[in-house]
Amino acid sequence: MLDPASPFRPAVSMRGYGRAAAEAAAIGIAAALAVFALFYWLAAASLHIDRAALARPVTAAFANGALDPAASWQHGNTEIGSHQYNDCLILFQAMDDRAPARLRAVSPLSVPIETDNSCAALQALTVGQAPATTRFYHQYLHGHTTLARWLVPQLGVAGLRGLYKLLASLLLLAGIGYALLGLARGPRVGEAGAWLAIFVVFARWYGLESFGQSLGHGPADLMILTFLLFLARGSANRPLGAGTVMIGAALFGALTMAFEFLTGGLPLGLAIILGAVPLALSGGGEQGRALLRAVVAFVVAAGATMAAKLLMVVALFPAGALTVIEHQLLFRVGLEQAARRETAVGGREFVTHLWAGLEGLASGMQLLVLGSLLIALVAGGWGYRRLRAAGPAERFRASALAGSLLVPPLWLVLFWQHSAEHAWFMDRILTWDIAGGMALFALALRQPASE
């Protein structure tokens, strides 16, 4: 048996972490391939749906006001949602059938890149006035487009929006209910208090009244809320096993990428993995290794899912198809300027748009959002200091939760050009800073005050 004081023990420990990371990477790749194969099959099968079956409910949506051809954005709208541009873009992608099905199963056709009003383009498409050119949208996996093809003919546009909003409401109510039961009679009262804080914050501050019905935001939001409920409910009576959490994180990463539309699913998902997973784990000495497995599984699954899509693009489309993706990435992080922009995005535009975007958390109430964010961070700081004086398990959770609060603001800064142009909905990822701060405060309440 190895002496605990042996100088070789750190190397053995590092090898253990390496094996854990390798195992998590393998699980992440397996989950990615499974999810990608499923969505590719669903996308290919959806192309057999009669185009008229899609066109009829879309035409009806313009007639009854569920879609507004005059406006791409409806800030604060709780009926058709704030981000109508994405809804019309997704419906356009679902309907445009001017390219071979084998190609559209990989990447849908989309509106011309200079389009400012996707709803006007969609309405024109419904009456046979398609754009003169075709453009394949290689970025993303477009799982939301596949769902729209399947569900809009059955539910209509308003019906699909209502379904997304209903599911989000039920997930939040279940999370709040289970957290209250945990506080009342569960063995993990501290964790239950943290989960209650998280679900209440998401119910109030995530802007679901304006975004939950979105054909673009809705599916990714549902993945986030489902994973939170999986962690909270699964660990209500006893901690979840590291393997179970790792598999859940891998599926979460792959499904998040399937529905990601650069609306915040990836950074918010990573923050949740870092901060919320420790709440579901035991307080033993394997916490660090279990969290590493979850992080690696999530990141690798998301990356491998996108890699599978890019390999399909390379295999089926002409050379140079990936150049568009490269330019878009450089543009979004501010390293390259789009040809259609007359002036570069600057620091002033970044700050002003970020401030305006706070209403994505609560429409028209930026001051309340900012105040709540500051209060949560102060309360979280108090909780963090108190938990740092507790045992190793509490210190680990506190550090993980505190570290996770850095992910949303760092993402907004890293993709600063994208944040400056689209911060009115990207700010929603700051919900985690409110939720995480309140969770730290709730966890610290059960700790005795230090002398």
Image: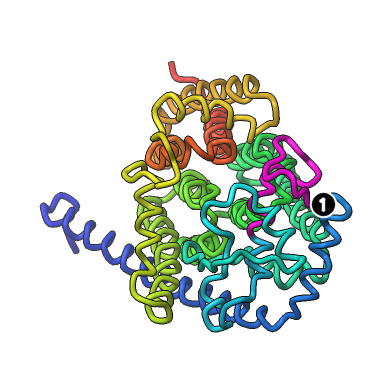
Residue 313 or residue 220, whichever sits in front: 313
Tell me if residue 84 is in the magenta stretch. Answer: yes
Q: Which residues are magenta?
A: 66-89
Residue at 64 percent of width and 34 percent of height: 361
Q: Can you give x and y, in whole percent of width and height, for residue 53 in the image?
A: 80, 75
Q: Can you give x and y, in whole percent of width and height, for residue 123 in the image?
A: 74, 58
Residue 282 or residue 367, whichever sits in front: 367
Residue furthest to the left in view is: 7
Q: Would you place residue 115 above or below residue 74 in this image?
A: below
Residue furthest to the top in view is: 451
- For the stretch drawn in magenta, the main secondary structure is loop
Would residue 340 be found to the left or right of residue 125 on screen?
A: left
Tell me if residue 196 is in the magenta stretch. Answer: no
Q: Can you give x and y, in whole percent of width and height, for residue 259 in the image?
A: 57, 61
Q: Would you place residue 182 above or below residue 47 in this image?
A: above
Would residue 293 be found to the left or right of residue 46 on screen?
A: left
- The residue where tag 1 is placed is 66
